[in-house]
Image: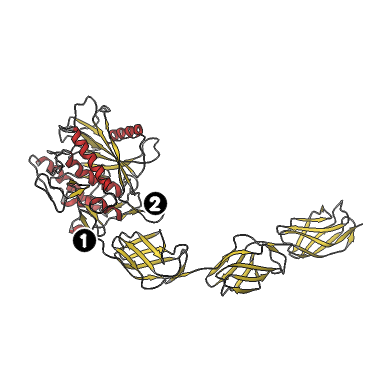
Amino acid sequence: MVSMRAGSILRLLVVLAAMAAVAAGLAGSAGAFGPARLSTGPAGIVRPLGGSIAPFHSTAAQRGAGQVLLTYHGGPVMRTQTAYAIYWLPSGSGLSFGGNNANYESTINQFFTDVGHDSGGTANVFGIDTQYYDTLSGGQTHIAYNTTFGGSVVATDPLPSQQCSDGWSGDTYCVTDAQLQAEITSVVNAQHWSEDSSHMYFIFTPQGLGSCYGSDCSYASYCAYHDDFFPNGGTGPIVYANMPWTESPYDCDEGQYPNGSAADPTINVLSHEFNEAITDAEPSTALAWIDSGGQEIGDKCAWTFGSLSGSNGAEYNQTINGHHYFLQLEFDNSSDACQQHPAAAAAPTISSFTPSSGASGAAVTINGSNFTGATSVKFNGTSQPTYTIVSTSKITTTVPAGATTGKISVITGGGTATSSGTFTVIVPPSISSFTPSGKDGAAVTINGSGFTGATAVKFNGKTASFKVVSDAQITTTVPSGATSGTITVTTSKGTATSSSSFLVVPSISSFSPSHGKVGTSVTINGSGFTGATSVKFNGTAATPFTVNSDSKITVKVPSGATSGTITVTTSGGTATSSTSYTVG
């Protein structure tokens, strides 16, 4: 829809110059900041009318260039939304929101309240946003249409020093984006409001107060814009929108007033900016959902309105909580079109998946159709929250922990697709318990699951003979030369490792000679000596000593030793000789 108003010749020249700059940028660059974003201006804008519409929303030519769908670029979205209105009426300025301030403010507040009231619904443009997501908390966390109006404030802080001139509208005053940010920060701090990607602040400026963001100014370059900033000392971003006065004669007014208020054209561009912030919350630092030309969800549908109701001058295309509004459409990725509300999604289908089996954590590719906006992937009813929608016909994911053999399903707004084939979940063996300790040759029972077909049992890497009693039990013996450590059971489906260590208890079978004076060399025979930490003669420590092997230690009778038993200590316990060594 193109609107050409009287006295727009100069404005049209400015718009044509902007269009030429956009065309040059589009031809020479495929970077993230494309035609919807001014290189020296704010991240997301509503451009003015005056013949500039066609280049700034999705056209057939752009679709042919592959620019039609929005794609995710890693930044945050507003998963839930709390909106605040800041009405800046600087004291002593003589400015006002038209002839009826209360009507302007109350109509905008009514809009925020109505949008919140219809949360979770699909009857207006905000329902379109729910198909988009971010991955910042792991997996794909979708936007919820869950909006709350946090309240409004009339700020009377005086005008700051004049640092800009819009040179366009003839406004008496002009404030910079930095000055707007300072005013928002002041109000947020005073009200103790939150600073994060779930809260958004709309600052409304009155008639006669223009603004500039660098060299881009209100009405010439934008009707409104959204952006984000981190205030000094702030813990998170402040997501905000600059909402200048939009009522005619400026080129930001279509001339439709369904509420009979000067707020109606402001609400039109407010909705555009709110939806763009929801799907691209922090565009100055981390882009979220844009197309390959840099356009956001609202840019692709700027100044298009779809089917209208009502009489000329009071037309509307949205009824929210019983009130009528004239709002720009938003882009629906699932239908590749500008919509007044979410398009009915086509039912998804699953045609195949690969591989046909895998253990927990194994990569799986699901093929089919109509996967855009998928909200859930399940393996035999077990949800896998981490998945990637590669395209409308492909999803990549992994087998979730706890999954069992059965069908794979994908859920979208269009329904649930269930695979015809069965995915076999490979369950590796697991060890739940075992006899905690024992010496060489001691009988050990290992309990767990998945033991059928076991091919190996090891004690800290030492192979042991074994018998599979059942899928849940194995009997074995401590192999000669085993040391303390974990037990493993291997099958064709994987290897189970015990969560705790088996302790190999040392034992002394003999020693020689049986007697001798201090300094006599003694050989101690037995098992489980690896890692020995102590050798004693009737309680007197002998150092040093040599662990020749797991079954042999050589040592000398220590000074001060008396006749008695010999002990050898390891991490598995203490072995005591059955006979005494005689000193003398």
Locate residue 408 relative to residue 519 in the image: left or right: left
Task: Give left or right: position of 163 versus 436.
Answer: left
* Category of crowding for the residue at label 2, using alpha-carbon neighbours closer than 10 angstroms: few (below 14), some (14–19), many (at least 20): few
Circle 1 sits in a helix, a strand or a loop, which is it?
helix
C-alpha distance separating marks 1 and 2:
32 Å
The residue wearing badge 2 is 136
In the image, residue 151 sits, relative to residue 516, either above or below, namely above
Q: Is residue 200 visible?
A: yes
| Residue shown at 74% from the left, 55% from the top | 533
**Residue lying farthest to the top in this orientation:** 92
Identified by mark 1, the residue type is Gly
Question: Could you tell me which secondary element the residue under label 2 belongs to?
Answer: loop
Which residue does the image show at 17% across and 44% down from the upper left? Answer: 48
The residue labelled by disc 1 is: 64
Is 7 situated above or below 64?
Answer: above
Q: Nearer the viewer, residue 197 or 533?
A: 197
* Residue 220 seen anywhere in this rendered image of the structure: no
- Of the two numbered discs 1 and 2 on the same chain, state the one appearing first in sequence: 1
Residue 414 falls in which quadrant of the image?
Answer: bottom left
Mark 2: amino acid: Leu
Q: Is 485 rendered above or below residue 197?
A: below
Specify whether 383 is left or right of 546: left
Residue placed furthest toward the left: 6
Q: Nearer the viewer, mark 1 or mark 2?
A: 2
